[in-house]
Image: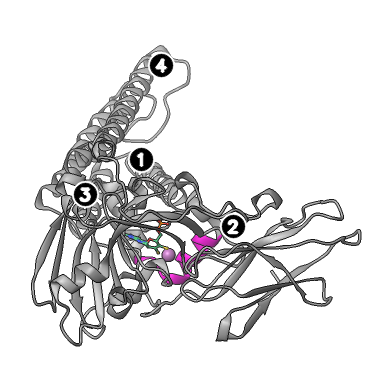
Amino acid sequence: LAVGHLVGALISPSASPLLAVGGSAIDLTPTWLKDFAVRTFGNYDKVVLLSGMIAVIAVIGVVAGLMCRRSRTPGLVLIVVLGVIAGVAVLTRPTAGSFDVLAPLAALITSAGTFAFLHRLASSPETGEHPETGDSAPAGTGSARVPRRTLLAGSAVVAAGAGIAAAAGQLVAGRSGVEASRQAVAQIIPAVPAPPIPPGADFAADGSPTFITPNRDFYRVDVNLTLPRLRAEEWRLRIHGMVDRETTLSFSDPTKRTLIERPLTMTCVSNEIGGPYISTANFTGVLLADILAEAGVQRGADQTFTTSVDGWTCGSPTAALTDPSRKAMLVIAMNGEPLPIEHGFPVRMVVPGLYGFVSGTKWITDLELTTFAARQAYWLQRGWSQRAPIKTMSRIDSPGPFERVSPDTPITGIAWAQSRGIDKVEVRIDHGAWQPAELSTEVSVDTWRMFRLRGRWAPGAHVRSEERRVGKEGRSRWSP
Ligand SMILES: Nc1nc2c(c(=O)[nH]1)N[C@H]1C(S)=C(S)[C@@H](COP(=O)(O)O)O[C@H]1N2
Ligand SMILES: [Mo]
């Protein structure tokens, strides 16, 4: 596995057998299981998946070892079976190239060779285990101890070799030049900068989030076990399908256009009540409405189907991208710096008012005008909605669950209804009367709004509930 990972790192991020099998597992996971994993492990879901895979392979290895006391055939068969699974996983990744197969092949050959070598050491007549009978030689006899030591030494050398290969693989993968390419991007200065965030835009001193989320704290959701490696100078965006003029953009293209910067709140549909998958940043980019107008969208192209460099796909309603008041963007910078790699470097899409899975394509490389009838994107194939406008929601941030606070601690939180805006938030304690909360200064209808309720609370345990009301949309309520 380690050798396969190293060879894979030299070829492409998805060629590593371990990562390819993990990626396929993510794509094949039924939605209920994926929801369970996100709910239970949160941002650690990928670590849990990879650790689980390694644990399963270790158990298979132990079982195989026990089966090979008499003959090495079961072990070799198992290696070939695992090798074929890895080969199939690698070759069926959406971005697989023909060289990718070298990684699982290297893993298979190395595994077979290593296994044969260790099996010979283990079954040489002087070792403790006798291959014919499986009996142990009497402990402490000189003839048994020395070869057993040889076997242990052989295993240690193999383990060390694997460790070095795995570490080298990680090192090579990390040195792909993407961070260097990101550092080399000249400072991105928007022609139309975002207005300064007004005082009173958050209640951070009383426990709400800060209005702008620093990049390192911005929530991250994607199906990637490894980050794609796409350098700015290699980036191309092909615009095609139901358009009058096909075009291909390169990275110098957006930087030459009028760059606008604006604060937007992004949200993930997988965010649970009280959950963390919501953040706000100042995004800099170009308006998709302009780019699509240049390409000339043909009548009937109701879906804009975008693909990222690793093959993930996304279907957005074209009307939301061409509507100039919506201000959907191709984004190249976030909070004043080039997009962080995990947030889509070099270019991503952001559309206010739509959940990320139908609008937020990171590492975008292909944009096709088509119809909803013609193509189904990644999450639609897995049972999620075709059109996914962000719903009105809220979250109480402070006091936290089971927190002990003084009786006059303010209750603070956030409410959001991107593209419509928040008019009012009401809070109630236990099952008392609804009380209107104070709202933070509104920055735009596309960003979250903070609320705060001051008062003096009676000692003891309380439950909190809140109500949001947004324009014409009416009320919705729950008790988190
Ligand atoms: N290439 C790619 N883009 C993607 C995704 C993905 O899995 N792959 N996930 C989407 C989802 S579900 C969300 S909510 C947003 C999250 O963007 P962020 O990680 O920058 O917060 O990215 C979207 N873009
Ligand atoms: Mo999402």
**Residue 143 appears left or right of 405:** left
Give the secondary structure at mark 2: loop
Against 166, residue 338 (above or below) is below
Q: Earlier in the sequence, mark 2 or mark 1?
A: 1
- How far, Cα to Cα, is label 3 from label 4? 33 Å
Residue labelled with disc 4: 145
Residue 242, given in percent of the width and then of the height, sits at 14, 79
Residue 232: numbered disc = none
- Residue in front for this viewpoint, 102 or 62: 102
**What distance separates the C-alpha of mark 2 from that of mark 1?**
63 Å
Q: Nearer the viewer, mark 2 or mark 4?
A: 2
* Disc marking residue 65: 1
The residue under label 3 is 80
Mark 4 or mark 2, which is nearer the start of the sequence?
4
Callout 1: 10 Å neighbours few (<14), some, many (20+)?
some
Check disc 2 and report the residue beneath it.
201
Q: Amino acid at mark 4?
A: Arg
Mark 2: which amino acid? Ala
Callout 3 crowding tier (Cα within 10 Å): few <14, some 14–19, many ≥20 = some
As measured in the structure, the alpha-carbon distance from the residue carrying label 2 to the one carrying label 3 is 60 Å
Q: Which residues are magenta?
A: 28-39
| Discs 3/4, front | 3
- State whether residue 307 is above or below residue 66: below
